[in-house]
Image: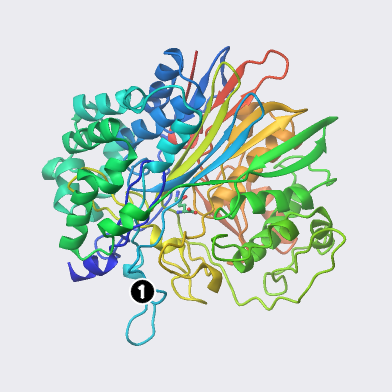
Amino acid sequence: MIRIQRTILVSISVLLAAILPFTPSAKGQTPARPRDDAQAGKAWPQQAVRAAHGMVATDEELGSQAGVEILKRGGNAVDAAVAVAFALAVVEPAAGNIGGGGFMLVRLASGKTTFFDYREVAPGKATRDMYIDKDGNLDKEVSVIGYRSVPGTELALKTYGTMKLPDVMAPAIRLAEGGFPVSEKLAREFDRERPGLQQFSVSARIFLNAGQMFKAGDTLRQPELAATLKRIAKNGAAEFYRGETARMLARDMAGMGGLVTLDDLGHYSPKIREVLRAKYESGAHTWEVLTSPPPSSGGVAVIEALNMLQGVPLKGWDDPQSVHIVAETMRRVFADRAEYLADPDYSQVPVAGLTAPCYAKELAATIDARHASTSKEVKAGAPHACGVSAKHDPAPQTMVSLGEGPHTTHFSVVDAAGNAVASTYTLNDNYGSHVTCSAGFLLNDEMDDFTTQPGVPNALFGLIQSEANAIAPGHRPLSSMTPTILLRDGKLSFVTGSPGGPTIISATLLSVINWMKLGMEAQAAINAPRFHHQWLPDHILMEQQFPPALEQALNAMGHATKRRGHIGLVNAIGIDPQTGERLGAADPRDDGAAVGY
Ligand code: DON
């Protein structure tokens, strides 16, 4: 318990505001791993789901249905997105909880775009070296704390929604109160997460059926969560930050030795940030990429990579040459990520330089078309805007290695008018800290996204990040979440994003390349095999779908390779340019569901 107490942190995020506590303590926690739950042998859909009006694509059918219910009742994409976010908080406890944080990218049919940042923030009592023990070593077991907020979603709803909070929260409240049938996937997950969940009495009672364990088909009811959702529906996000829910959370924190206080909760606020944009020519069309600004590292990385790939003739992922060039691009982009990205409210992030086409050209020129480079020789570059020379030679200290990844969820919504939402949010690890507060929701362990000790990999992703991402009260930890929207000739074309820690960036980038540059059908763009290179460790991580011959060809070029079952879970929506139909492409890797009407 002492260890757990040390671990509790809170991050605050905007969605609905919550706060969060913990870090997964290593003791009793199953090793972090990506969810890889698509049922063995279940055939993947080969075509996207088509619908004339609206479409919602999420990890869970019940979550997608909640969004469609709101669309059919006349709500717009933002109303539906808020409904989905709350519904996933009930039916996808691994990731969709209100005790985490995230980003929501909105593009209205009018052309207006907004980025809602409800990322968690470190509590007031957080300190830079809070995870370093008396001997100066990083205690990885305690780095998972966080707190978050619910205000993000409410802010989005107030800004662009047309319905009231109680209306959009109705499906979530129904699911929490009346219960829903536990799927095979969920029953498997509870079983897998048992070592972590059983350490905490509220978690064990709710998710492990007080030790009896749930079977597929059993009903999961969450009365405490239902009561919390009802209070939020009635009182708004203020309930989460200053109301009874905040008091419950603060009491739990104090009881368990967590750092989040009522004062932290009361001071949290979501932020509206400017959307990152870049234009490309491809296939005789002009494309605009709208994506996530810092504290996401993903939008900068995706634009930097697409800039480097301008004019590169990619053939597809059965072509070793194409995989090689994109992997080398990822290597360089991740070297820059490690060096330069952090909370923009407290650091000068050189976004303009990193996303400048001429800087990308210089970086691309360092790629050997036939041979792999090594991450020993590839360091972060010296980003600069076009027409401005690089100011300094960076001396990067940072290194990255890849851990296996935890949990987060991405969903996409498009309504009948063409308004679109791309939203990704996270508890960080699967089931976050595994701690469920007395208000019935799981707390995140987002603190591990900070640089827990410069030069030492963080616990969940093995990321070694820069000093600029160090822990400090009120700072937002750097994120990889990358909700992204594409326009083709000025019109909505593709809505995408993914979970997966650092692999979020690669999975999102590949979905964009598949749709925009390779012209794949929407479902094919999601099904296509994925790979990832994050500079360090120096290998290409490849899904099992790649044939051995392709791996051998990469090895012959000098690439080390490693296999992983699945990378990312991209729930995307494309727009058919001919018919305007919405093409729902959920990720079959985890039995995602696209529902339209
Ligand atoms: O914000 C981030 O980058 C991480 N907390 C995301 C974690 C994640 O995607 C785990 N998912 N599978």
Q: In this view, does 84 lie above or below 498?
A: above
Along the line of sight, the residue nearer the viewer: 318 or 123? 123
Measuring from the top left, give residue 161's x and y in whole percent: 47, 26
In the image, farthest residue toward the right: 387
**x then y, percent, for residue 182:** 26, 30
How is the structure coloured here?
Answer: rainbow
Q: Can residue 540 be seen in this view?
A: yes
Q: Which residue is found at the position 61% from the left and 50% from the top?
A: 293
Q: Where is residue 181 in the image (x, y as percent from the top left)?
A: 25, 26
Give the class, few, some or many, for how many residues have Cα within 10 Å of label 1's Cα (few <14, many ≥20).
Answer: many
What residue is rendered at 67% in x and 19% in y?
A: 576
In the image, 269 versus 109, the foreground residue is 269
Position of 317 compared to 123: left or right?
Answer: right
Figure check: 37 above or below 8:
above
Asked if residue 444 can be seen in this view, the reply is no
The residue identified by callout 1 is 131
Residue 172 relative to residue 339: left or right: left
Image quarter hosting the N terminus: bottom left
Q: What residue lies at 39% left-to-right and 77% top-to-bottom?
A: 129
Q: Quadrant of residue 472?
A: bottom left
Q: Is residue 235 above or below residue 66?
A: below
Mark 1 residue's CB less than 8 Å from ligand 1: no
- For the residue marked with disc 1, what is the amino acid? Tyr
Q: Where is residue 180 in the image (x, y as percent from the top left)?
A: 25, 26
Give the left or right position of residue 369, taking residue 353 as reference.
right
Q: Quadrant of residue 95?
A: top left
Q: In this view, does 268 lie above or below 365?
A: above
Q: What element carries label 1?
A: loop
